[in-house]
Image: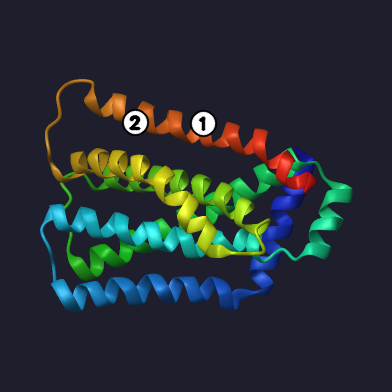
Amino acid sequence: MNKIITLLKKDLLLEMRQQHTFFGILLYVASTIFVLFLAMGQPDSVVFNALFWIVQLFVCVNAVAKSFLQENQGRMYYFYSISSPVHFIIAKLIYSALIMLLMVVVSIVLFTILMGNPFSHALEFIGIACLGGFSLSLVFTLMAAIAAKAQQNAAIMAILGFPLIIPQLLLLMKLSKSAFGEVFRDGALMQITLLLLGLDLLVVVLAVILFPFLWKD
């Protein structure tokens, strides 16, 4: 656990030193939502829900991609000598999840200010959005690890991640409808939530199993 915390601190320190990348992502979030506001004003709940998750998808691609793509080959050799692949990938997953959770909170605030507040249950939507940001970050962190070994090709991350992210997005959009007042049959929301958590667990297990093979490459 100490090694994971140390690697996580390393990523956070690098983020603080390279603040232009972090604020660049914040600017991307703010400008995207502002353009949507200029184009659509204050949409109804269905359009609001769809736009929110589309924005989160593209924000996640930009925010998580740099977690691995910023690591040069010399630095990876150094990590190879001092850390295990399991510790390294778990630290990356936690770091990406923290960044994405922050972006989700910023997105919710900006969406609410600019595009209205169509929620029937605001706290429920915040919880679902945070769960969704966590889920998206797990998938794209694993894809970023694969892309980093393919000559730093970020396009590979989007190509590989797209088929994996569609089921999660469908579940998230379905789940978040409950925050806008849509009624589901008894037990349906719990089933969707458990299925989403099961997918998250599957991604973590795959990352722990598959990353050591990338680590040795």
Q: Residues within 10 Å of mark 1 (few under 14, many from 20)?
A: some
Q: Residue 143: x and y, percent?
A: 55, 50
Q: Quadrant of residue 35?
A: bottom left
Name the residue rendered at 69%, 59% in the picture.
11
Name the residue rendered at 20%, 73% in the picture.
37
Residue 138: image tag? none
- Asked whether the viewer can see residue 105, the reply is no
Residue 193: image tag? 2
Q: How crowded is mark 2: few (under 14 residues within 10 Å), some or many (20 or more)?
A: some
Q: Residue 184: x and y, percent?
A: 15, 29
Q: In which quarter of the image is residue 147?
A: bottom right
Q: In this view, does 82 lie to the left or right of 106?
A: right
Residue 202: image tag? 1
Name the residue rendered at 13%, 41% in the picture.
181
Q: What element carries label 2?
A: helix
The coloring applied to the image is: rainbow
Give the number of the mark in front: 1 or 2: 1
